[in-house]
Amino acid sequence: MATTLWGRAKEGERQAFFALFQAHARRVYSLSLRATGDVIAAENLTRDIFMEAFTCLDTIGDDSAFAASLYCRAAKKVLANRAKRRYPQGFGHQPGPHQHLSLVGRAELAIHPE
C-alpha cells in the first residue's frame, strides 16, 4: 500500500485526492485569479486544472513530480485562457474590408487596410 498522498490518490483513495487538492488549490487558484481578474473564471480554471491533473496520475512519478506537473499545467491553462479571452476570434482573425485595428489614443500606430 502506498504511503504518499500521490500514491494513495493513484490507487483511488478519495481522501488522498482531497488532501492533494487542499495542499495545492490555494496556489493554483491564486495564479488563476491573478491572470483572469475574475473569481468565477479562476474557480472554473482551478477545477479544470485539478480534473486534468487527477486523470493523469498514472503518468506522474511521485509527489514532487505531481506538484511540478500541476503548476506547469496551471500556467499553460491560464495562458491559454488569457489568450482566448484576449483574441476570442483566434490569432488568424483578419479584419473585414471596412475595419481597422488601432491602439486607443495612438493614431500614429493605427494599422489600416489598404
Image (tube, rainbow, N blue to C red):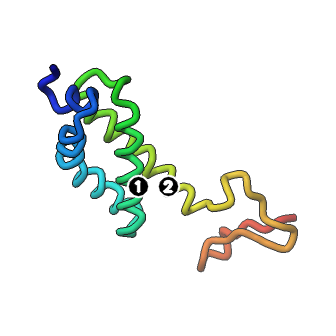
Query: Could you classify mark 2 by the number of other residues whose Cα lies within 10 Å: few (under 14), some (14-19), or many (20 or more)?
Result: some
Q: Which residue is mark 1?
A: 45
Q: Residue at x 32, y 39 (%)?
A: 70
Residue at the disc numbered 2:
81
Q: Quadrant of residue 45?
A: bottom left
Q: Nearer the viewer, mark 2 or mark 1?
A: 1
Q: Position of residue 99 (x, y in %)?
A: 79, 72
* Residue pictured at 56% horizontal, 62% vertical: 86
Whole-angstrom CA distance, mark 2 to mark 1, is: 8 Å
Residue at 71 percent of width and 68 percent of height: 101
Quadrant assignment, res 100: bottom right
Up/down of 66 relative to 100, above or below: above
Q: Secondary structure at mark 2?
A: helix
Up-down: is 90 above or below 23?
below
The quarter of the picture where the N terminus appears is top left
For disc 1, the neighbor class at 10 Å (few under 14, some 14 to 19, many from 20) is many
User: Where's the C terminus, which quadrant?
Assistant: bottom right
**Contact check, label 2 and label 1, Cβ < 8 Å:** yes
- Disc 2 marks a residue whose amino acid type is Asn
Q: Residue furthest left?
A: 3
Q: Amino acid at mark 1?
A: Leu
Left or right? Give the position of 32 relative to 25. right
Residue 28 x, y percent position in the rendering = 29, 51
